[in-house]
Image (cartoon, helix red, strand yellow):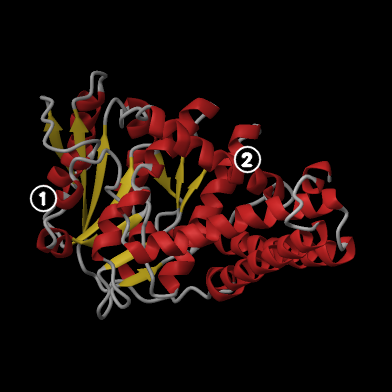
Amino acid sequence: MPILMQLPYFPQDIIEVVLLGSFLIAFLLQMVYFWGFFRRLAFFRNREYDHSGEAVSVVICARNEYFNLKNHLPLVLEQDYPDFEVVVVNDNSQDESLELLEEMARKYPKLKIVNLSQELNFFSGKKFPLSLGIKSAKNDIILLTDADCRPASDKWIRNMASKFRGETEIVLGYGAYEKRSTLVNLFIRHETLWVAIQYLSYALSGMTYMGVGRNMAYRKSLFIENKGFSSHYTIASGDDDLFINSVATKTNVDIDIEHGSHTVSVPMSSAGTWFNQKRRHLTTWKYYRSKFKRLLGVWSLSQLAFFTLFFLLLALNYNVMVVAGVFFLRFVSYLLITKMSMKRLNERKLLLFSPIAELFLIILYPLLSLFNMISKPDKWK
């Protein structure tokens, strides 16, 4: 209040009206996103198809992932699907991963090993080993996951492959994280849920901008025709989002959110590891096509503006009933979209924590972007 009194050319009542008007504009923008985009996933009915029988190549990159490969790879190799192979790229592992893979290959004929024993820095991050894995695959449908992921069921390949019909060249799935009794785990699962709400909803709107490498599929022919990761090979991240961003169209993408089609990943145990992963992901945003940067930017800015103006107007004690009513409408919309999306994606015990996590992430993302300006995040292991 004292600050506003120091502005003689802008009477306090005019400033308050401008703040309220800006607050209402931010609210309307949020409603457009909730009910124009995010409702598409929240109320989505997954389309079930019989599998086409088309052969599939599962591609996994692994570096020093002995225990994850031991625990998760058999669940991939024992999928209920008639024709598939599993290509594992052992990327310069210093543990006993290669010995484990060779032992598994004797038991599972479907396993193909691509072993990298020298550091070849043609690409940043895991793009080079992933490119080798895709090019070594014998089938046109490439299904991607990570070594620290396990399929939620033995129907994972069947369900994802069944979506390749008509013009479909890309299928986006959901990669969940295991539930743990820690605060970091709550934030990780909330952020994973809301990233999925956005990229899956936009895909259903014909505006696909990314997928997650823990669970997505595309045709090898699409990868080859578009020269793989060559347009962004110098960027450490982007093997999932930048590639999909560049090749997705309004008609060549489908999604599969059947619970048996999910993958489940081992969550990061420390906040520092998770923060650094988020920093790597944020480095790719500036390379998105302009329309997607606008789409994501308006959502984030309206979200930040809404909460900032809400607390400011409360502090000014200006039209409290109106401000509180608008906030309540937004809060109900947020909870409804979150709850229905949790149901679709089989997420549990996040709803009550979700509003707190949303506020935390609104603050966190700008801070991580600032850190990226000061120093580069760690590379993919």
The residue at which mark 1 appears reads as 135
From the viewer's perspective, is residue 284 above or below residue 52? above
| Spatial separation of the CA atoms under disc 1 and disc 2 | 37 Å
Furthest-bottom residue in this view: 166
Q: Nearer the viewer, residue 279 or 88?
A: 279
Q: Position of residue 334 (x, y in %)?
A: 68, 62
Q: Which quarter of the figure has residue 25?
A: bottom right
First along the sequence among labels 1 and 2: 1
Q: Give me the residue at 18% from left, 44% from top.
A: 233
Q: How many marks?
A: 2
Q: Nearer the viewer, residue 12 or 300?
A: 12
In this view of the protein, can residue 159 be seen by the observer? no
Q: Is residue 323 left or right of residue 180?
A: right
Q: Which quarter of the figure has residue 69?
A: top left
Q: Give me the residue at 34% from left, 31% from top.
A: 70
Image quadrant containing the C terminus: top left
Q: Nearer the viewer, residue 234 or 60?
A: 234
Q: Within 10 angstroms of label 2, few (less than 14), some, or many (20 or more) residues?
A: some
Tag shown at residue 186: 2
Q: Position of residue 335 (x, y in %)?
A: 71, 61
> Secondary structure under badge 2?
helix
From the viewer's perspective, is residue 142 above or below residue 6? below
